Image (cartoon, rainbow, N blue to C red):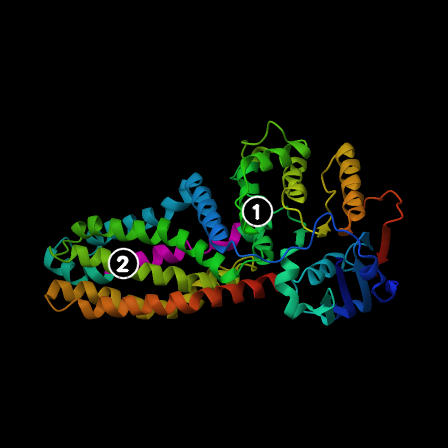
Amino acid sequence: MSLCLQARQLACERDDRWLFEGLDLDICSGEVVRIEGPNGSGKTSLLKILSGQLSDYQGELFWNGAAMKEAREHFLANLLYLGHAPGIKLGLSPLENLAWYQALSGENGNEEQRLDALERVGLAGFEDVPAGQLSAGQQRRVALARLTLTPRSLWVLDEPFTAIDRHGVAELERQLVAHAQAGGCVLVTTHHELTASPLLRRISLG
Amino acid sequence: MHSSVHSSSQGSDTTSQVLAVPLREHKGGLMIAVKATLVRDLTLLLRRRGEVLNPLVFFALVITLFPIAISPDPELLAVIAPGLLWVAALLAALLSLDSLFRSDYDDGSLEQLLLAPQPLAALSLAKVAVHWLLTGLPLALMAPILGIMLALPAGSYAVLALSLALGTASLSLIGAIGAALTVGLARGGVLLSLLVLPLYIPVLIFGAGAVQAAIFGDGVAAHLAILGALLAASLMLAPWAIAASLRISING
């Protein structure tokens, strides 16, 4: 079994300016694909198009060979998207935040899994603190806890290293590579320099 | 412009890499997701009580001011009371709409909601239900007490509460369409009111009409039935419209 996200002749226009044109992509199992480019080159737009959030583009998307329109449900069931904003409710504790994400995918889960996921991102002891009282980096870590809590094969991560300390960055990098080695697939934008790895592939925009 | 190297014709299929995270089939769990969304929104709003109290305080203030400004004459007040109560409740409900999707939009959980493998219409219906539970229902329960202040004739209190409970549910559903459409705009509040108010008018007419009919001793059932019908229609159509509007807003 393998997964494959393909784009054909992808083009996106913003304010009378082509962000990219004629882009062909094949993103398959066992890869960490890094989208590079200067600010405003359309990295986030590309990730949003690839994760099915923007419909304002030209070209076609395929998921495991089927057109995205037909395969959307299957695609969403296997996608984990972390956007620019971490998607963490400040009024809820990390545990409550994670519980909602787990339930969104249709699983009840249990508290043990959530505690474990929080511990793995270094938030042991902060489980019941309202997220509003956590630092920006800790909030980002709550979002990153979803990577272990709700396993998905395709990760689409927009600037996941934002506000994360050096140790956390190294840890997350290892996690990305391990996910690719296990046959998953990671699509990431970052300004942070990723350590070279045979699994790493770059795509430059702009 | 770079384009990627095509990994030639799916050789990986035959080598069949074993996925440690196997591809998942989408398997229901809609009720779990809806219930979790209900619980989450209720918890969030109950922790920010100010936001819940705002429309109620507005409602109470407006109704308190009318007898002072117009006249304390019970006969005059009784004539205008149904309309006053209904207009004030409608505006109070409208006030609270802007925040319905706003915080989700700002902190990124709205995009997560859109990417959940669940029908967006059902999840947004859960959010609207919470809005009604914490705005419409309290307004309906509070209205009889404020009715006393307007010398509302006895016998119309139950109808007032019932018509408001039914009516505000439609108002929440219809208003949520507007809230979803304007969530991406920095100052969507005014636009939201303009969009939504015309659609509120039928609910207002039959809601205030029900209370008036109760005062004059006419049959109330017809008015309430029409309010029920309006609610049924909005329940069927609004969730889809809300979902579509949210997608448009996220696209913008």
Residue B199, picture quadrant: bottom left
> Counting other residues with Cα less than 10 Å from the Cα at mark 1, is it few (<14), some (14-19), or many (20 or more)?
many
- Quadrant location, the N terminus of chain B: bottom right
Tell me the SS state at disc 1: helix
Magenta stretch contains residue B94: yes
Is residue A82 in the magenta section?
Answer: no
Q: Mark 2 lies on which chain?
A: B
**Closer-to-camera residue (A145/A131):** A145
Crowd rating for badge 2 (residues with CA inside 10 Å; few <14, some 14–19, many 20+)? many
Q: Disc 2 marks which residue? A: B164
Q: Is residue A94 left or right of residue B126?
A: right
Q: Name the foreground residue: B183 vs A94.
A: A94
At numbered mark 2, what does the secondary structure look like: helix, strand or loop? helix
- Point out residue B181 in the picture as x, y percentages from the top left corner: 52, 64
Which region is colored magenta? Answer: B84-103
Residue located beneath label 1 in the image: A101
Q: Quadrant of residue B233?
A: bottom left
Q: Position of residue B120 (x, y in %)?
A: 52, 60
The percent position of residue B243, horizontal first and vertical second, equals 51, 64
* Majority SS type along the magenta span: helix
Both labels 2 and 1 in a single chain: no
